Image: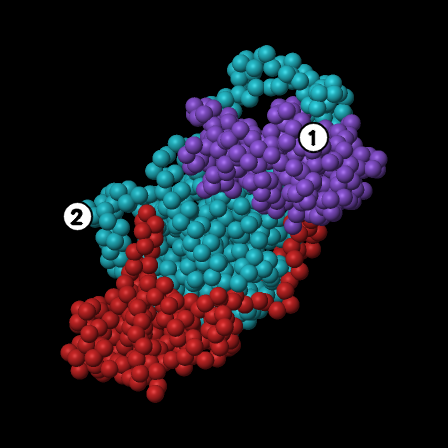
Amino acid sequence: MSNEWPLRSSGLRERTATAVADPVLRANVGAATDRFRDKRTSALARIHDPDALRSAARGMRGDILSSWAETLELLADNVLANGGHVCWAPTGDDANAYIASVAQRIGARTVVKSKSMATEETGLNEALAAVGCDTVETDLGEWIIQLAEEHPSHIIAPAVHKNRDQVADTFQARAGMVERVTEPTELVAFARRELRRRFLEADLGITGANIGVAETGSVVLVTNEGNARMVTSMPRVHIAVMGAERIARTWDQADLVLGLLAKSGTGQALSSYTTVLSGPRREGEADGPDEFHLVILDNGRSDIAGTEFAEMLNCIRCGSCLNVCPVYHQTGGHAYGWVYSGPMGAVLTPLLASQGGGHDHHAGELANASTLCGACMEACPVEIPLQDLLLGLRRRNAEHAGRAERAMWRAWSAAWSRPAAYGASATLATRARRLGPLLGRLPGAARWTDGRSMPTLPERTFRQRWDAGDV
Amino acid sequence: MSGPLPGSADDARRVALFVTCVGELLDPDVPVAAVRVLRAAGCTVDVPEGQTCCGQPAWNSGFTDDAAAVARTSLDALEGAVADGADAVVVPAGSCATMMRVYWPQLFALAGDEAAADRARLLGTRLWELTELLDALPDDRLPLGSVEPCTVAYHRSCHMLRELHVAEQPEALLSRVDGCDQQVWAAADQCCGFGGTFSVKLPEASVAMADEKLDVLPEGTEVIVGADASCLLQLRARAEARGMSVTTEHVAQVLERALPDAGA
Amino acid sequence: MAEHGDRAAFLDRIRSRQGRPTGGGAHPPPPAPDVVPELTYRTLDGIDAADPDALLPVFVAAVRAAEATVDVVDGDVGADLLGRFVAEHGIASAVTSREAEAVAVGTVLASLGVAVTPYDREAAAAADLAVTSATHGIAATGSLVVDTEAAGSRAVSLLPRIHLCVLPLHRLVASHADVLRAQRPPMPSARVLITGPSRTGDIEQRLTLGAHGPVALHVVVTRRP
């Protein structure tokens, strides 16, 4: 993982508190997620029985990954048959090294990228900078973030935390905007002009991959802006970086995923552009890259297979769990500290961070960024039981918990698994009620009392009243 | 998805109440109200000795074995009550009912106690969340009268809504109470921000979540009603700190006040 | 074409990991469906999917819902319609795809004084208008399917300021499933399902058209008498 991310240099509480204290961020994230959530609801209302489809999609994703290796093999063979190159990248460094070597071979100076979570994960931009490439993010939100040297706060709307004035500031300071404009249409027009120039001069285009479809060796890219189409049409070479799990065996399977993807994410029937790419430019075609490369990235994914967390590999990166999560709603994506945010990030980040079997306290802590309210599973187009996975991560954290925390739960368990001790502890609590005001001053009590009143304890427990015949 | 479903409601004559730890320690008025309402519905109510907590605090924190030891204590007590003739186990808290019906089998299995997992599955077939049972009874089993006129907004707690799929029942019961004026709360099914230890692990986010609900509380709401005392604790504590005049009440307490002889 | 990295090791690692037993959660997955179900759109209820005339109103509504515009004409796209279009959008230059329908429109546009050239990158990047046809129109979503084999380029429908697409009525199908699921090798090097103009909501969620691609998309459905 790249060191620039705040995951390891700060704590989850510190990051959430910072986010909650930022009124611009909260207003923007809140408005955006509300809007996505409402549009999702309307989009799904336009098809019959979306819940049955989500359930079928869950079973189908499981089926695809039950023959994961075979499907990847078929995909790779068909990409090669289509005239493409295939790179097997066990780690992010392997992927970066391969891409950098292609860039050097073709003498690439300008690299244009369309939004790709996988390359955020590998820190590709730094690797390309190291070999002298000027890498430009071309999704508008990603470009704003790149210019501002910040991190994405939403999987499908990376600059959602910034308002128009902040965007204009960034364009003036970092993109040479001379005459300040603040209307979104004018800001978009400025970006279009600047980035159009970069598309036309670029030597190398890099994208992610929404789905790799094995039966035809195709890669599907979904965008609204059209930047992925630019990136895969203008430069001489196109490299698609695909998380190894983002596959379908057949077009029937890919069709179901694509049918649910945009509806779940932005609430569109389909995104503006669903592009199916099957190899480099052919004889007689007027544009398109001379070379197509598919980089298949593991980077910790295979370690998730065969564990209780395997269903996380079903994720199609739509962002719907972010939009319905009441915690994300308050904090936005930066609180999660790394590439992925919201419930899917709270699960995926600890899993990817622990590749090789180690335990990462900083990443593991993300499992606490949830009230286990279950809204995420309810919204997920492939019904990932995110609350179950979060619970599983908490169990894993508990195995690495400190002595004090273990002792506390053991003492609790010892008392409350004995009815007599349980009754005594309840009675003791009622005796402590007179100490109420003092309890609020105990160390740690501020975690409750800053912003909330202390509850008053009752005079008698339920059992005391029951035994006294007062019920 | 909600685990085994309870059998017929009308067969529930002898019921065993699971008090819950929050009911025992913090809010005994809630289980007291539940007992009185169940009695008014023609049930004989037993409160089995030996029950403690469902184990949820430790389970949600990842401490499986500690949770299982506590849960097993309550499983033993409730199973004993069923063996002694109870037709149903009733839980006046959506979150605890979810823990017991949906998560207990997995909890015991992970703790290596497959026998307890099977026993929990069987108990789950007789386990009801309070309003789930009351609403399933024929209306004439539970005569509901009127309360002093009050304006209420109902909070749908997460586990009950999304795991137990008990959604409409509490509001359907409240609508049978004269004088109980239910408002439409746009944030009714939004999480209150409690989440057990979440409330103290990430307190700033927790408070912000409560605020978001309270910010859109319908004008004139006097009482926030819910079916989970822990959610109500969170909302009350935040509302008080904000100086709001709204109070909270468990749905069982509203129903208790509406019992025909309640005011007599 | 070439392969890089160690395929066998990569796949062996996946196979070895999958051998491990998985734990059962509280929400176990359903079995895989025998047949992958299709999305069924409510707008198609009661409509004969094999009848393009029946699909047409559904398509028109979906195109408009995607912030595009649409005309339906009998016969060829005439000089009247194109004359109005050129005037309304201030079109001085156009590039065409190599599809016959697009070339025919290009000829009419040239007669109206528009500078029309076949696609090339620089011309397209500077042009006001792109003219293409489509291999399919998708009624449920209002999408157009444009592929490189037919159009001759990937970016002809992308670079100009406005995209005009001529769609013969008989190419209408009900749903994306009819296009995507029917794909078999050999595939075109690129195929795109276009649903409305290029757009972004990245600044304050404000829908802004023409992010990188066309700011407007106009569809002309042509009916044969």
Specify few, some or many for label 2: CA neighbours under 10 Å numbering under 14, 14-19, or 20 or more. few
Viewer-side label of 1, 2: 1
Q: Residue at x 31, y 43 (%)?
A: A163
Residue A467 circle label:
none
Disc 2 designates what residue?
A: A179
**Nearer the observer, B195 or A92:** B195
Mark 1: secondary structure: helix
Write down which chain is painted cyan: A
What amino acid is found at the position of numbered circle 2 in the picture? Glu
What amino acid is found at the position of numbered circle 1 in the picture? Val
User: Where A178 sits versus A451, above or below?
Assistant: below
- Chain B takes which shade in the image? purple
Residue A400: give x, y in percent of width and height: 63, 34
> Mark 1 — on which chain does it sit?
B
User: Where B207 sits versus C18, above or below?
Assistant: above
Q: Quadrant of residue B256?
A: top right
Q: Residue at x 53, y 63 (%)?
A: A48
Disc 1 designates what residue?
A: B35
Specify few, some or many for label 1: CA neighbours under 10 Å numbering under 14, 14-19, or 20 or more. many
